[in-house]
Amino acid sequence: MQKGLGNMMKQAQQMHTKMQEIQKELANKKVDAESGGGMVKVTGNGKGEILSIRIEKEIIKQEEKDVLEDLVLIAINEVLKRSQELNTSEMSKVTGGLKMPGLFT
């Protein structure tokens, strides 16, 4: 029994180490999203951080302010969704698809 428990602990430690490595790698993986037919583009990383927002000059008009704000919001929400999907996909490679609450941040 002790040998089995020790083996399990070793595997858990290896999984933990691998998950930490993936978290570091996710910071370097990029996800992109756009809205308004490409007028607003947002880039984020696998950690859920927004890296850049690009807005085409044609859409920057005072009378279009509300539309621009909506397009930025849509693109940001989409890139955050893609970032979470990337994070979940990468972590599931380590966990074998097991749901482990609290381990994905």
Image (cartoon, helix red, strand yellow):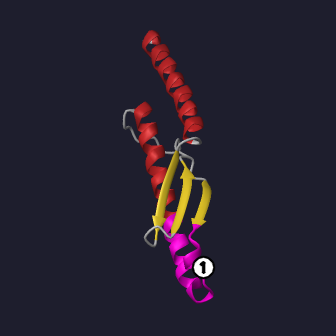
Q: Residues within 10 Å of mark 1 (few under 14, many from 20)?
A: few
> Percent from the top left, x then y, of residue 14?
52, 22
Element under disc 1: loop
Query: As drawn, which residue projects farthest toward the bottom?
Result: 63
Which of 84/65 is in front? 65
Percent across and percent down for residue 84 are: 48, 51
- Indicate whether 12 appears above or below 75: above
Boundaries of the magenta span: 55-76
Q: Name the residue rendered at 56%, 53% in the picture.
A: 44
- Is residue 67 within the magenta segment? yes
Q: Position of residue 30 (x, y in %)?
A: 53, 47
Q: For the point 52% across and 44% down, which residue is it? A: 104
58 inside magenta stretch: yes
Secondary structure that dominates the magenta span: helix
Kindly identify the amino acid type of the residue bearing the numbered disc 1. Answer: Ile
Which residue carries the number 1 mark?
Answer: 60
Q: Residue at x 50, y 58 (%)?
A: 79
As drawn, the residue found furthest toward the left would be: 97
Residue 97, percent from left and from top: 37, 38
Q: Is residue 79 above or below residue 96?
A: below
Q: How many marks?
A: 1
